[in-house]
Image (tube, rainbow, N blue to C red):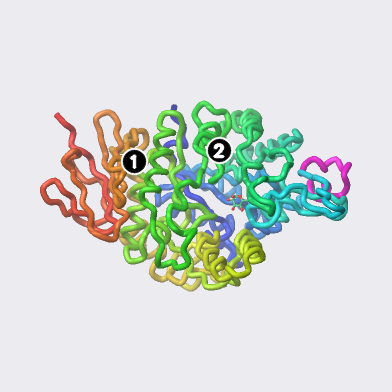
Amino acid sequence: MQYWWMEAVGYQIYIKSFKDGNNDGIGDLKGITQKLDYLHLLGVNLIWITPFYDSPMDDNGYDVRNYFEVARQYGTLDDFKVLLKKAKSLGMKVILDFVLNHTSDEHPWFIESRKSVDNPYRDYYIWQPPKVIDGKNYPPTNWGSFFGGSAWKYDALTNQYYMKIFSDKMPDLNWKNSKVIESMIEVGKWWLDLGIDGFRLDAVSHLARDQFIDSTFSNDIVLDWFKFSNLPDNHKYLNQLHEGLFKPYNAFTIGEVGGEASIEEAIKYASFNSNEVSMVFNFDHNWHNNIHDITDLKDLKVDVLGLKNTINTWQETFKDIGWLPLNWLNHDQPRVVSHYGHVDYHGPSAKMLATIMYLSRGTPFIYQGEEIGMTNFPFKSLDQIDDISTINGVKNQIDKHPKDREKIIQKALMTTRDHPRTMMQWDDSEYAGFSSVKPWFHVNPNYQSINVAQQISDPNSIWSYYQKLISLRRFSAYSKTILYGTYQMILKDDPNLFVYLRKLNNETLLIIGSFSDQKQSFDTSLYPIDHIIIHNYENTQIDANIIHLRPYEALCYKVKERI
Ligand code: GLC
Ligand code: CA
């Protein structure tokens, strides 16, 4: 089984923070078009652009008001057509973010829906009467939302609640209503007819809802996502989208199924035999450190064994039956070099992380700025935060546990989705070359030492290393093995080294990455070195059969064939 997207190298663009093309402080479509040559030079040939549809921007565009219009702040439909044309001329595929679970509360469907219980659009959304206990009104169930608080919002006009598993301004669509599916197929066709290549499907494990019965986990409001994740009907809806939309257009689709979908569910969504989506993004490998218990950033420790186990389990499970995306983060997660790397070994650790991820079996999705090792932002207080989920979540937790206020804030500042959303660092000019005016959000103070301009001209930079890794995948003598070889993790119990083999026919590649800031060693006796293919240090310290690895050292070598 081979598809074009298996050989692609993807790149995620968070439009608002990528490049400002008209100097109003907000990233836009023109800015992306200006940077397509840059992405081409890096070796990327598939881009995923986060939502740029018309929206009141409660959640930076994931709250769509009109699926057929471009948000004015991002440009015009003509700007998008220019972008698409240029991308195609560079051999680059383009996928868009398709928000299916909810719309904005300002979408005309919802404006109609809330007017009366018999409005023709009423059933486009999920409405329920209040639960009445002792004459008092409560939400229909005690289910919590992802962004904090109840998953229901009261609407006085009809004395009912609508469901919203994200923010109040993002009412959930009712997928039981076949008109919703038909309407969304129409939206999808409209964009595919323009010439795009597919979609990243936002929050797509949540389309089906359980019966509206309280969660028994707690008497209080509780985020029991089983009530609205991966239910059997969710597969049915995706299958209908597949038959009615994805298949006829031969569209590539990658479903965001998040941390809620188990590996068994992921197989149902995205094995080669499932008629749902091409691949899924899961987040199992995203939080393998002590981030959720600590209060001091200096103590951040990576759970290397846990991380290895997770990555290996997904690789093993999907080896013959499907294909995986390879990614460290997206616009909702912290910067990987800040989480799994080391500040004192910024360059080596960023390169090590890239090595072990992007030589695996799957399709890379690099997140903007990752290719130069952009870091988390040194947030100090809540008033520096823009993200609606952080703001609502913190408020909600503090209401519940006022005594833990400081701890709650500190943890939120470390995990906030705003870390990956600071401006892309293009050069060392004011505002990092993102814009000529003050941007809508922060520029990381380290932009003068970490930026594209400086790294492109340095053959030893993180950027140059990414370019080399990508070219190994796409254009080298080892491409076939990197793309289609088997994946076998070795030294599974080693708490510092991440090591695996890729094999195809007679060729074996060995990939080693050290997660340690101390010296480590690796015995090559079983896997003698033929030659080194890529390496994040200049020379190799080798003594008899032992490679002495320096902090965060990573290398890939070809193993000598046995004769
Ligand atoms: C997805 C997006 C996230 C958004 C949410 C609701 O998880 O990645 O940014 O807030 O869906 O649309
Ligand atoms: Ca702009």
The front one of 434 and 361 is 361
Q: Which mark is residue 46?
A: none
Residue position marked by numbered label 2 in the rendering: 253
**Circle 2: residue type:** Thr
Image location (x, y in percent) of residue 431: 50, 70
Q: Earlier in the sequence, mark 2 or mark 1?
A: 2
**Circle 1: residue type:** Phe
Give me the residue at 80% from left, 45% from top. Answer: 128
- Please tell me whether residue 342 is drawn above or below residue 216 in the rendered image: below
Circle 2: is it few (<14), some (14-19), or many (20+) Cα within 10 Å? many
The reply to whether residue 65 is in sight is no
Specify whether residue 221 is painted magenta.
no
Circle 1: is it few (<14), some (14-19), or many (20+) Cα within 10 Å? few
Q: Is residue 87 left or right of residue 550?
A: right
Quadrant where the N terminus is found in the figure: top left
Residue position marked by numbered label 1 in the rendering: 475
Image location (x, y in percent) of residue 20: 56, 62
